[in-house]
Image: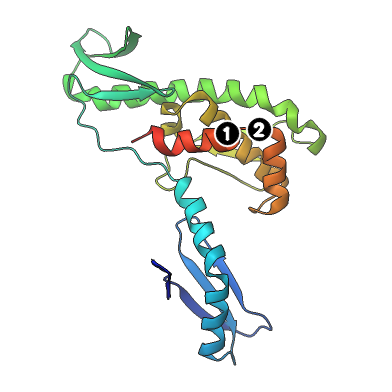
Amino acid sequence: MQFGSAIIEYKLDFKDRKNLTIKVYPDCTVKIIAPYDSPIEKIEKHIKKKAPWIIKQQHEFLSYQPYTPERLYVNGETHLYLGRQYKLRIEKGNKNDVKLYRGRITVFCIDENDVKKVLNKWYREKAFIHFEEVLTKVLPLFKKYKITNPKLHIRSMEKRWGSCTPNGRIILNPELIKAPKGSIEYVIIHELCHLVHHNHTKSFYDLQEFMMPDWKKWKERLEHSLC
């Protein structure tokens, strides 16, 4: 369906039900579920009416997706850590290690073909330490909601910076360690708010605003920092 300059692609399913529903998923796909006897004209009219909401939801999910350009892992290439840029330096070493010093991120490798593997392992280790620290810092804000001990997991995800499960697990993308500290805090608060309100409702955004009044600034930094 054409709506202004946007094209909304959707999957239409018919089921034995009374009402038509529209669902927008994190990968930005749209699914319409309609009663069996719904005329196509009525369905299209409803989609057009809800088009601004659909596009808004898609933009929300897109802004929350990580984007990191492909790296070659060669000397002089720029790599990020906690929102700062570092020039990559590769050195032969008798053990695999990574050091930050004066604007450089130096990777020492036994085998220079393992630069990517060594650096990513270091990122993952730093991610777990820093994410745990941030979670510990902001968790007391949610005490009244009886969120006291969520389990933190690190998992690579193509489409998400973070997610949470109904049983209280918070899952974060290790790539997030490359973002500014405030953006990391925003993502963790975002997921904690989802443990209270599971959808992007007004109540969810009201809670997020209360917990982090400047969240929009850090969300925007997140969107533009890893490119």
Q: Are marks 1 and 2 in contact (CB under 8 Å)?
A: yes
Q: Quadrant of the C terminus?
A: top left
Q: Residue furthest right?
A: 144
Task: Tell me: 58 left or right of 36.
Answer: left
The amino acid type found where label 1 is placed reads Tyr
Task: Tell me: 213 left or right of 184.
Answer: right
Give the residue at x 72% y 41%: 207
Q: Earlier in the sequence, mark 1 or mark 2?
A: 1
Which element is circle 2 on? loop
Position in image of residue 163 (x %, y %): 55, 44
Which element is circle 1 on? helix
Q: Which mark is residue 212?
A: 2
The amino acid type found where label 2 is placed reads Met
Is residue 211 or residue 216 the one in the foreground?
A: 216
Q: Quadrant of the N terminus?
A: bottom left
Is residue 92 or residue 6 the one in the foreground?
A: 6
Residue 225 falls in image quadrant: top left
- Residue labelled with disc 1: 186
Task: Tell me: 82 left or right of 16.
Answer: left
Residue 69 falls in image quadrant: top left
Position in image of residue 21 (x %, y %): 61, 74
